[in-house]
Image: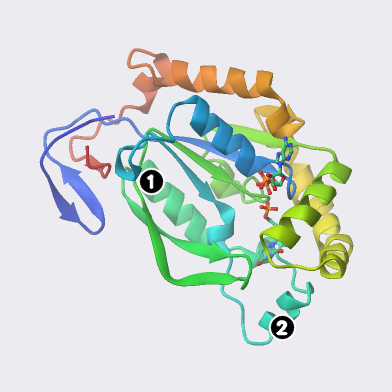
Amino acid sequence: MASSGKGDQTQGAVRVNGFNDVPKPFLIGVGGGTASGKSTVCSKIMTELGQNEIDQKQKQVVIISQESFYYPLSSTDEPRASRGQYNFDHPSAVDDELILRTLSDLKCGKAVKIPEYDFVTHSRKPDAWRTVYPADVILFEGILVFYFKDIRELFDMKLFVDTDADTRLSRRVVRDIEERGRDLDQILHQYTSLVKPAFEEFCLPTKKYADVIIPRGADNTVAIGLIVQHIEDLLKPNSNLCAKRLRHNSDSLVSRPH
Ligand SMILES: Nc1ncnc2c1ncn2[C@@H]1O[C@H](COP(=O)(O)OP(=O)(O)O)[C@@H](O)[C@H]1O
Ligand SMILES: O=c1ccn([C@@H]2O[C@H](COP(=O)(O)O)[C@@H](O)[C@H]2O)c(=O)[nH]1
């Protein structure tokens, strides 16, 4: 990634003069059912790539979650969501156009602003936007990341975290009670009536698009080690892929300010 350079601020991105060969971010999609361990796998990859101690603006690897792209709920849907009756697992709940625009902008080297989601209130946190810079590697995780064709085609690598359904449900119960303010009845009702059928209809069929399937999620240290090794190899300055990632555009836009 180009490191320094004097740039001027242009609509959220920094135009760097004189850099012809700026690598595009390497975009990795991480799909899988609810509570399969997508976030945990992503954070293990971050840790193994030594990214956790690095300042936000300097990070070479960043994680973005599909949850940031839920549509705001209407006043009639809000009470349904609180009763576990709103279908957050259906593709229509997700602003796929905003995802496409966001990931495309990152791929073009532009910084983006991403809304932060609050699972407790089922809504975007008011006025909480995170700026994401086009790092070397961007991990985009979520249940439907491979569902939309245009989005799917943006990924340079597709991972599917494949964890047994009983394990996922038991983890979801614990997580949703501890972290997402749910009660058991609501979780089980939502799971059986909405989450499971949607998983089978919209998420599971996307497993076929994966380049790598990770059985047992974050427990699969061998698979995670191989993926980390592969990313490290790709990011070496002389690798073939790094060469492919170089843009041959004299008017490059890059945003990571270092
Ligand atoms: N390998 C694992 N062993 C034990 N608990 C796990 C494991 N992977 C994930 N978890 C826990 O299960 C829950 C769901 O994991 P998470 O990574 O958030 O899944 P997802 O992002 O797919 O929804 C979290 O509470 C997490 O700490
Ligand atoms: O407000 C909300 C938004 C989403 N959900 C559920 O979350 C999961 C997806 O998140 P994972 O971290 O991948 O589990 C999805 O199954 C939705 O049902 C929610 O309950 N409330």
Residue 111 on image: x %, y %: 32, 50
Residue 249 on image: x %, y %: 23, 35
- Asked whether, in this view, residue 104 is left or right of residue 39, the answer is left
Pointers 2 and 1 in contact (C-beta within 8 Å): no
Point out the frontmost of discs 2 and 1.
2
- Asked whether, in this view, residue 171 is left or right of residue 5, the answer is right
Q: Secondary structure at mark 1?
A: helix
Q: Residue furthest top?
A: 238
State the CA–CA distance, disc 2 to disc 1.
35 Å
Instruction: Check disc 1 and give the amino acid type.
Output: Leu
Q: Looking at the image, which is closer to me, 199 or 176?
A: 176
Q: Residue at x 49, y 62 (%)?
A: 116
Q: Residue at x 39, y 14 (%)?
A: 239
Label disc, if present, on residue 79 of the rendered structure = 2
Q: Looking at the image, which is closer to me, 241 or 233?
A: 233
Residue 183 on image: x %, y %: 80, 68
Q: In the rendered view, would you say 104 is above or below 237?
A: below
| Figure quadrant of residue 175 | bottom right
- Picture quarter with the C terminus: top left
- Asked whether, in this view, residue 212 is left or right of residue 111, the answer is right
Q: In the rendered view, would you say 206 is above or below 247?
A: below
Q: Does the closest atom of ligand 2 sit within 8 Å of the Cβ of label 2?
A: no
- Of labels 2 and 1, earlier in sequence is 2
Ligand 1, seen in the image, is in the quarter at top right
- Asked whether, in this view, residue 163 is left or right of residue 222, the answer is right
Q: Looking at the image, which is closer to me, 231 or 173?
A: 173
Q: Residue at x 63, y 49 (%)?
A: 142
Instruction: Check disc 2 and give the amino acid type.
Output: Pro
Circle 1 Cα neighbour tier, 10 Å, few/some/many (<14 / 14–19 / ≥20): many
Q: Which residue is mark 1?
A: 106
